[in-house]
Image (cartoon, rainbow, N blue to C red):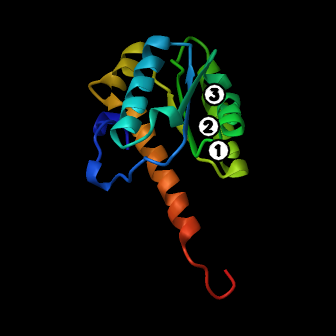
Amino acid sequence: MASALKNLSDYDEKNIPSAEDMIFGIVVAEWNKDITHALYEGAYNTLIKHGADPEKIHTIQVPGSYELPIGAKLLIKTKKADAVISLGCVIKGETTHNEYINRSVASALMQLSLATNVPCIFGLLTPNDEQQAKDRAGGKHGNKGVEAAVTAIRMVALDKEMSETKRTIGF
């Protein structure tokens, strides 16, 4: 669903599991820092709101969005994160560079998730202009960082739930 049709900060709070025992990594791109830092605030505050221990939220910055996957990998390796939230913003410019970066980041984060069994959440804004980015970083369409944090909590909880499920008949 397009964010123009749904506020990125709206969710049913009572259906979000506690993040109390979870370890999170947040990797933030420095490029477009006014936008990415607003995304970070949304993500961090949402994790805290749902019980995450500030000592178990590990944040690093990388130069740009293209470096988000390697930052995520470092957080998984060094901090043993249960999930990593990757936050960046690539605004379309005069060339098609944004398409290459966005696809590469999305693909690399998915590959990393599958290879490590650690959810690497795609919190990369891909707007056409700066106003669209602002609208999705705490503006009229909410904050993608909030949505990314909720997704991270839910995916870690799902992993824990599935790990505790008793297997029968050879599965």
Compared across the picture, whether 107 is left or right of 87 comes to right
Q: CA distance from mark 2 to mark 1?
A: 6 Å
The residue nearer to you, when weighing 132 against 112, is 112
* Residue drawn 39% across the image and 51% down it: 18
Compared across the picture, whether 10 is left or right of 109 comes to left
Q: Quadrant of the C terminus?
A: bottom right
The label on residue 68 is: 3
Callout 2 touching callout 1 (CB < 8 Å): yes
Q: Quadrant of the N terminus?
A: top left
The label on residue 110 is: 1
* Depicted 58 relative to depicted 149: above or below: above
The residue wearing badge 2 is 106
The residue nearer to you, when weighing 153 against 124, is 153
Q: CA distance from mark 1 to mark 3?
A: 12 Å
Return the x and y of residue 45 as percentages of the image width and height. Answer: 37, 31
Q: CA distance from mark 2 to mark 3?
A: 10 Å
Q: Secondary structure at mark 2?
A: helix
Asked if one can make out residue 12 in the rendered structure from this viewpoint, the answer is no
Amino acid on which disc 1 is placed = Met
User: For residue 96, which quarter of the picture?
Assistant: top right
Amino acid on which disc 3 is placed = Leu
